[in-house]
Image: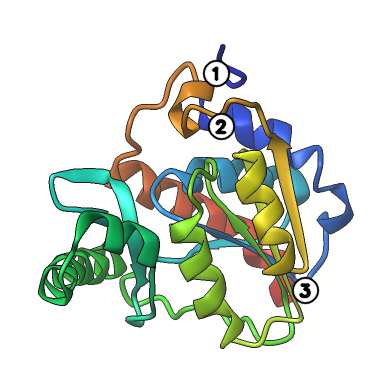
Amino acid sequence: MPIFKNRMDAGRKLAGELGEYANRKDVILLALPRGGVPVAYEIAKQLKVPMDIFLIRKLGVPGNEELAMGAIDSEDVRVLNQDIIRSFGISDRTIAKVAAEERRELHRRERLYRGDRKRPELKGRTVILIDDGLATGATMLAAVKALRSKNPSNLVIAVPVASLDTCRAFEREVDDIICGATPEPFYGVGAWYEDFRQVTDEEVCDMLEKSMSLQKPEED
């Protein structure tokens, strides 16, 4: 049975669990596009903190693309699920081909979403990674590993819904993790939303543009 009407509803509910981060100049939300952007936008509005995006792409198993064999970010940091790779007998050549395709998509989105805008400075800040949910966590794990190299003071994950096992596994990867709901059996992220349609590029760009006003207090 769905818990949330849509991603915006999920963001508003999740914001209620993040009150300690409200109105803090050291805090920045990083949404994983595209599904994490509406969630982060609603949180940013309520907490009055800036938001941006962190680009990462799932590496899907050929013929079963919803199943992640790993993930890759825009700086070519890769995390691979060796259990999945072994189970399906996936070759290094196939992994490289899928990674190359996703890399092209990452670069397209970087140009589209960010344009000439610089990536935010993350050193010494509290970074809260936002997505619409966690299933295997492969994409989020790649994001965590990539962001560690940026030297944030604290790295936090916040999601509206997650597999309990995945949520627990991340406790040793980050400084804090907030999972709004951990229903069992899990079924998948989309099962807990009434409306889980794909977020469009246009919607992402619109929310990012609107969110810029939330960053003005940081410039004081």
Distance from label 1 to label 2 (Cα)?
A: 8 Å
Label 1 is placed on what type of residue?
Lys
Q: Nearer the viewer, residue 30 or 83?
A: 83
* Residue 105: quadrant of the picture: bottom left
Label 2 packing within 10 angstroms: few (<14), some (14-19), many (20+): some
Residue type highlighted by circle 2? Met
Callout 3: SS: loop
How would you rate the neighbour count of disc 1 (Cα within 10 Å): few for under 14, some for 14-19, many for 20 or more? few
Q: Residue at x 60, y 82 (%)?
A: 148
Query: With respect to residue 166, does 124 lie above or below?
Result: below
> Which residue is label 1 attached to?
5
Tell me the residue at 34%/27% (across/down). 197
Left or right: 137 in relation to 97? right
Q: Residue at x 61, y 27 (%)?
A: 9
User: What is the secondary structure assignment of the residue under circle 1?
Assistant: loop
Packing grade of label 3 (10 A; few <14, some 14-19, many >=20) is some
**Which residue is label 3 attached to?**
26
Q: Is residue 140 in view?
A: yes
